[in-house]
Image (spheres, helix red, strand yellow):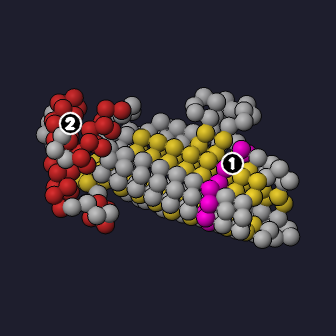
Amino acid sequence: MIHATAIVHPGAKIGDEVEIGAYSIIGEHVEIGDRTWIGPHVVLEGHTRIGVENRIFQFASLGGEPQDKKYSAEPTRLEIGDRNVIREYCTFNVGTAQDAGVTRIGNDNWIMAYVHIAHDCQVGNNTIFANGASLAGHVHVDDWVIFGGFSGVRQFVRVGAHSFIAATAILLQDVPPYVNAVGNPAAPHGINSEGLRRRGFSPEAISMIKKAYRILYRSNLSLAQAREQITELAESQTEIRLLADFIGVSGRGLVR
């Protein structure tokens, strides 16, 4: 079901039951999985692979060259998983040779209008990006993160699972799992309790996460001391292991 005005390169690989809307352009190295819907005026270019049952709305531009002066037309990639909703005017770029060479978007993400995901970003599953949220290059986003409208993330920052980034927040450092980040520059404001309840976390688990948050941010301990206590807590509470492991790999330091 390809509209007569769409331009699809003969080399593109189109799955079964794919719909491509009017005036959309599909490049030579693009792969589109089964039952994906491409709206009108969409541009898919570069070495881009899109999974099954995605919905990509009008004027989205995916797989374009990185906004990076070091890029020299290397055959880097964009990979998008399954069942994502990508709304109007979103821009996702392929990776660069200076990193893994691929920008990845996982499964079941809800990505609203005007979202920008730059080169070499790695986005997990079940995330929500509100209108105008932007990731600079090399950002890592774990599962179930929510970004408020017009929030922004600096290069190489990591955003932990189940965290909540408030509208217009600017992340200059890593956000641990479960944490609410608010402001410019962003600072921690408790844990994402409501999100955790909606995802089935027990009251006991949420209470333990709050305890770990207090150790990290309210105890006046050094980061090393806080991590040691949180690691001990993780021995009896599996949800805390996620936080302990994240602290261990943080590269830009944690929001404080």
Q: Is residue 139 visible?
A: yes
Which of 169/225 is in front? Answer: 225
Dot 2: element: helix
Range covered by the magenta-colored residues = 46-55
Q: Is residue 226 magenta?
A: no
Residue at left 15%, top 48%? 211
Q: Which mark is residue 48?
A: 1
Q: Amino acid at mark 2?
A: Thr
Residue farthest to the left, as pictured:
219
Q: Amino acid at mark 1?
A: Thr
For the C terminus, give its image quadrant.
top left
Q: Is residue 99 above or below residue 89?
A: above
Read off the residue under disc 2.
231
Residue at left 68%, top 37%? 76
Counting from the top left corner in percent of width and height, residue 174 is at 37, 40
Residue at left 45%, top 58%? 126
**Quadrant location of residue 253?**
top left
Q: Is residue 1 above or below residue 233?
A: below
Dot 1: element: strand
192 displayed left or right of 158: left
Q: Is residue 119 above or below residue 112?
A: above
Distance (Cα) linking label 1 and label 2: 40 Å
Residue at left 71%, top 44%? 47
Q: Which mark is residue 163?
A: none
Contact check, label 1 and label 2, Cβ < 8 Å: no
